[in-house]
């Protein structure tokens, strides 16, 4: 018989970002009997969640929020009240890579985690299940338990669980609705097992039992780091081989198809690109590197660090290809950048290869004109700064007008159906197309007179 605590059907989530917002929206949708409150100290973000203009773009998210907001999903800045009334508290705050002190450039900065733990302890009037939702270093649960326990009073007890998210931006809603797995790690004590079973009972409202995996807390914490590191490794693998393909005359897409046909190797994440981006891959690999270095596993640390080095090399290589193909100078030339988000179906630009590539072109005195259908103008300015020769437009055909070259960085679907006959008339000659995502018909464009370059294929 399942072991569960007396759960009052109240859940709080501290952190209203890319993970907390969509995850809580799905729980509210699938568990109408549970009140879900998302809290954040950022007033502007909470105001956006309560408006018709959500702070993040994710296909399908807006429809779900409209359906459940005000019914059993609430957004608030009153962190204390949400903690007091909830039995289960998800913590989904930012854990950026440290930029100072010990572990700078490697370790995760857990400042916000500790602040969340202290807030939970200070406002709790009953025992709580505290759930790590964001990606955190191994043994973070131990540290959080120590902070909570040191500030606990009377009969109040805390159980800390690891429940890492496995969401991909752009497909977060289907990932939540039909997850490959839900991983829950807890302490191997009777109280820990009760807490794990209680959280599992929430997911069991829509997730098949066989997809709910339970482990000890440290296995769960490490599993998320390893999953992201492995996926990033596949991307760096195919990108490294794309350089080999260009030198040998091989076609990286044909090679990837042949490799993927082996059932033991699996499919996915074998498509050459300008490099991976997003908030997780680089941060989690650096976290794993720091973990290995801390335990004296320097050879293991160096292995994983190479994944990031190859990714940086690929971004540099693509920028260099653009300059070299355009007669070794882009000085004063207009370059249309199509796509600034790190991937399609999201407005997230964190670690986007577009940032590095645009910086390279700006350093070469190019006139850079950026178009992205979802990234706000002020976000692009935050990423690139208020620099000369940077223009941001809201129409793709305005971006390409009088341009010497088009650089496709994000695989937005609308770029696959662009009217290149119209574009050919708008651009200066010779007209260059650098397809970083292999999404346009290269032969058709060459027939129109374009000079087309891509990644991992003969020119």
Image (tube, grey):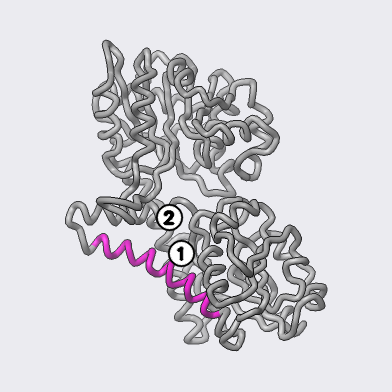
Quarter of the view holding residue 95: top left
Measured Cα–Cα span from mark 2 to mark 1: 10 Å
Q: Quadrant of the N terminus?
A: top left
Circle 2 Cα neighbour tier, 10 Å, few/some/many (<14 / 14–19 / ≥20): many
Q: Which residue corresponds to the image point at 44% horizontal and 75% vertical from the top-left?
A: 241
Q: Which mark is residue 235?
A: 1
Magenta-highlighted residues = 300-321
Instruction: Give the residue pinned by disc 2.
Output: 281
Q: Which mark is residue 355?
A: none
Identify whether 437 is placed above or below 42. below
- Give the residue displayed 60% in from the left and 57% down from the top: 380
Judged left or right of residue 74, residue 314 is left
Can residue 213 be seen in this snapshot?
no
Question: Would residue 187 appear left or right of 347 to someone viewing this image?
Answer: left
Q: Nearer the viewer, residue 109 or 312?
A: 109
Q: Would you say the residues marked 2 and 1 are in contact, meaning their CB atoms lie under 8 Å apart?
A: yes
How many labels, in total? 2
Q: What residue appears at the point 58 percent right and 84 percent down from the top-left corner?
A: 329
- Of the two numbered discs 2 and 1 in the rendering, the one whose residue sits closer to the viewer: 2
Q: Secondary structure at mark 1?
A: helix
Q: Is residue 312 magenta?
A: yes
Q: Residue 96's spot in the image, x, y percent?
A: 40, 47
Rendered location of residue 314, percent (x, y): 46, 71
Q: Nearer the viewer, residue 269 or 103?
A: 103
Q: Measuring 30% from the left and 34% from the top, which residue is drawn there?
A: 141
**281 drawn magenta:** no
Q: Earlier in the sequence, mark 2 or mark 1?
A: 1
**What is the quadrant of residue 343 in the picture?**
bottom right
| In this picture, residue 348 sits left or right of residue 371 | left
């Amino acid at each position: 018989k399942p072991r569960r605590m007396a759960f009052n059907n109240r859940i709080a989530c501290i952190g209203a970002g890319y993970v907390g917002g969509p995850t809580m929206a799905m729980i509210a949708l699938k568990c109408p009997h549970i009140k879900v409150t998302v809290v954040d100290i950022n007033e502007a973000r909470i105001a956006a969640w309560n408006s018709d203009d959500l702070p993040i773009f994710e296909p399908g998210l807006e429809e779900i929020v409209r359906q459940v907001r005000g019914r059993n999903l609430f957004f608030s800045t009153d962190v204390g009240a949400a903690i007091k009334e909830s039995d289960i508290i998800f913590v989904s705050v930012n854990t950026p890579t440290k930029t100072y002190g010990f572990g700078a450039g490697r370790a995760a900065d857990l400042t916000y985690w500790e602040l969340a733990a202290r807030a939970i302890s200070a406002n709790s009037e009953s025992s709580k299940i505290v759930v790590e939702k964001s990606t955190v270093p191994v043994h973070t649960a131990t540290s959080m338990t120590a902070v909570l326990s040191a500030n606990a009073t009377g009969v109040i007890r805390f159980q800390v669980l690891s429940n890492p998210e496995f969401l991909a931006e752009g497909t977060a809603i289907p990932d939540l609705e039909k997850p490959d797995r839900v991983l829950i790690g807890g302490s191997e004590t009777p109280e820990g097992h009760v807490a794990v079973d209680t959280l599992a009972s929430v997911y069991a409202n829509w997730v098949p039992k066989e997809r709910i995996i339970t482990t000890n807390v440290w296995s769960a914490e490490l599993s998320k780091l390893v999953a992201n590191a492995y996926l990033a490794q596949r991307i760096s693998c195919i990108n490294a081989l794309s350089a080999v393909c260009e030198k040998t005359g091989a076609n990286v897409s044909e090679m990837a198809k042949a490799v993927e046909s082996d059932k033991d190797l699996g499919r996915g994440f074998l498509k050459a690109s300008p490099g991976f981006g997003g908030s997780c891959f680089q941060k989690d690999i650096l976290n794993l590197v720091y973990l290995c270095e801390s335990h004296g596993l320097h050879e293991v640390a160096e292995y994983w660090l190479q994944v990031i080095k190859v990714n940086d090399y690929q971004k540099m290589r693509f920028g260099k290809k653009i300059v070299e193909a355009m007669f070794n100078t882009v000085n004063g030339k207009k370059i249309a950048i199509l796509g600034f988000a790190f991937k399609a179906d999201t407005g997230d630009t964190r670690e986007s290869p577009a940032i590095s590539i645009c910086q390279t072109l700006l350093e070469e005195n190019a006139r850079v004109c950026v178009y992205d259908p979802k990234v706000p103008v002020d976000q692009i300015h935050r990423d690139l700064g208020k620099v000369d020769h940077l223009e941001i437009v809201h129409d793709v055909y305005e971006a390409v007008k009088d341009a010497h070259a088009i650089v496709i960085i994000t695989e937005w679907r609308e770029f696959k159906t662009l009217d290149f006959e119209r574009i050919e008339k708008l651009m200066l000659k010779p007209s260059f197309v650098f397809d970083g995502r292999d999404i346009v018909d290269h032969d058709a464009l060459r027939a129109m007179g374009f000079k087309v370059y891509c990644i991992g294929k003969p020119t």
